[in-house]
Amino acid sequence: MTTRAVTVPECSATATSDADLARAIAAIPGDAWVYSADELVGNTWCCDLVAGHRQDHVVHVQTVEFASNDPDEYWMQWTNGGKAQLVKKPVCEAAFNPHTHDETYCLLPEEHEGPHTDGGQHWV
Ligand SMILES: [Zn+2]
Ligand SMILES: [Zn+2]
């Protein structure tokens, strides 16, 4: 399957990870985290979907690895004016190889709306 990079307007919605969210992350059992819970407090995150999307806003915040299982992936999900929630969903994992050796994978939940993104570039 071929993929191609696209330039799309990004959703401008942001949410701040607060102490409640950090506590929820700290309570996850597992071996390794991308960020410590403390590092998440007060961070502002931008939605990774495209402008005008209909699904709730979403951004990948955490991978929790296990010795024996596949990692669990966590997102912050929120609605306009609503409090961000920590949600666990399978990752999309669509691959993008922009004709270089820098293959990358989509960091949006399965069945997300719009183009794939790794948080930087977008592709279809
Ligand atoms: Zn959004
Ligand atoms: Zn994707």
Image (cartoon, helix red, strand yellow):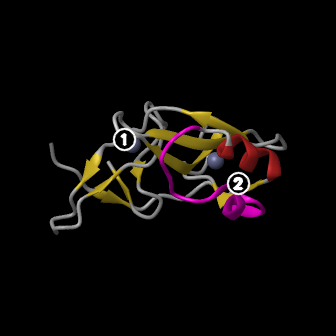
Q: Position of residue 16 (x, y in %)?
A: 76, 56
The magenta stretch is: 29-44
Quadrant location of the N terminus in the rendered image: top left
The image quarter containing residue 36 is bottom right
What residue would you read off at disc 1? Answer: 67
Asked if residue 102 is among those painted magenta in the image, a careful observer would answer: no
Depth check: give the residue in front, 28 or 88.
Answer: 28
Depth check: give the residue in front, 52 or 23.
Answer: 23
Q: Position of residue 49 (x, y in %)?
A: 54, 48
Between disc 1 and disc 2, whose residue precedes? 2
Q: Is mark 2 within 8 Å of ligand 1?
A: yes
Residue plotted at (36% across, 33% down): 69
Task: Answer left or right for 21 relative to 31.
Answer: right
Asked if residue 32 is among those painted magenta in the image, a careful observer would answer: yes
Q: Position of residue 70 (x, y in %)?
A: 36, 36
Task: Answer left or right for 72 relative to 74.
Answer: left
Residue at the farthest right position:
81
The image quarter containing residue 99 is bottom left
Depth check: give the residue in front, 49 or 69.
Answer: 69
Q: What's the residue type where badge 2 is placed?
A: Ala
Element type at marker 2?
Answer: loop
Q: Position of residue 114 (x, y in %)?
A: 46, 42
Q: What's the residue type where badge 1 is placed?
A: Ala
Element type at marker 1?
Answer: loop
What residue would you read off at disc 2? Answer: 13
Within 10 angstroms of label 2, few (less than 14), some, or many (20 or more) residues? some
Q: Contact, CB < 8 Å: mark 1 with mark 2?
A: no
Residue 49: which disc? Answer: none
